[in-house]
Structure formats: C-alpha cells, structure tokens
Amino acid sequence: MISAVDTSPVQTFVTALVERDFSTLERTMAEHVEFRALVPPGFRECHTSAAARELIQTWFGEADIFDVQYSTVETIGERVHAGYRVRLREDGDWYLCEQHLFAHTADGLIDKLDVLCSGFTRLPAITGVVARNNDYRQESESSGLDWAIRRSPA
C-alpha cells in the first residue's frame, strides 16, 4: 500500500524560490540531500543542502526582476513533481528559464531532488517596466505578461 506523499517540503521549496528566500529553500532539504541536476552545459551533483542551495542561488540570485509565469506541484506515484517557468532580468538582460523537479520526501524534508533545466534563453529587451507599490508592471504589448516582482538579491 502506498502511503500519502508529503508535498509540503516541495511546495515550500517552490515558494522560497519564487521569493528568492534561499535560506528557507535550503531548510526544505535534508542536510545530506541527494541533489542531481541536468542543466546546460551538463550534469551537476550535490550531496548537502548547503551545496544545493549555493548552486541554485548562482542560477537565480542575481536577478533584479523575477517574474514567475507558472508553477505547479503535484504527486506522481511516490514522488513529487514541481515545475515552473520564470522570466528574469539580470544585468539589464532578459531571460526565460523553465525547470522541472522530481523529489522524494521523508520526515518533512526533501531527501532526493532531480532537476531538469531548459537553460536561460535570452529574450528581446522588454521596455516600459514601471514601479507600482514595489511591484513592476510590464507595459509591453508583445509579451502578455502583466506582473513581475522586483526584489533586492538575497
């Protein structure tokens, strides 16, 4: 009999990533997590939550605008799948990235995490981003995306 799968550590992981709260993201993983990522240009592997956090932070930590286009968390058998697509700006350049995670959880933590990443696809310049209450509205007609979050890198 398959017991209920705890999705909460993965949901917290995705929320922390969206908020770029890398300390919370690290705390969702077991100290000796089995972390594997297939990313351009190749395979990456970490064996501690601190090392996994550091790697993830190198991917997303420098963006000054981080726009989540979609995210999902769901179970697939005894594993948890999460997917998200983000549009981000770093050093004035815009990128699009999508990742899919497959995780195993135990004792309220992620103990195994496999990541598949699209890489960062450079986008044409997006103009007309104006501040509104610490959020930023995208005024370009071409993208159809309305809101992006601007935060100082953690």
Image (cartoon, rainbow, N blue to C red):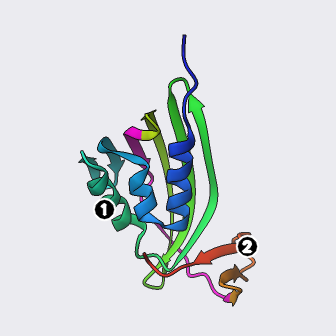
Q: Tell me which residue sits at (49%, 45%) in the image.
A: 100
Percent of width and height locating residue 141 = 75, 78
Q: Quadrant of the C terminus?
A: bottom left
Q: What is the spatial separation of the Cα atoms under label 1 and label 2, in whole angstroms?
A: 30 Å
Percent of width and height locating residue 108 = 47, 39
Which residue is tagged 2? 146
The amino acid marked with disc number 2 is: Asp
| Residue 120 appears anywhere in the view | no
Taking the magenta stretch, the answer to whether it contains residue 129 is yes
Circles 1 and 2, Cβ within 8 Å, touching? The answer is no
Q: Is residue 99 left or right of residue 39?
A: right
Q: Which structural element holds mark 2?
A: loop
Which residue is tagged 1? 54
Residue range highlighted in magenta: 110-130
Crowd class of label 2 (few under 14; some 14 to 19; many from 20; radius 10 Å): some
Q: Nearer the viewer, residue 86 or 133?
A: 133
Q: Is residue 79 left or right of residue 128?
A: left
- Mark 1 or 2: in front is 1
Quadrant of the image occupied by residue 136: bottom right
Q: Tell me which residue sits at (54%, 51%) in the image.
A: 12
The amino acid marked with disc number 1 is: Glu
The vertical placement of 52 against 142, above or below, is above
Percent of width and height locating residue 2 = 54, 16
Q: How many marks?
A: 2
Q: Nearer the viewer, residue 108 or 84?
A: 108
Q: Nearer the viewer, residue 67 or 10?
A: 10
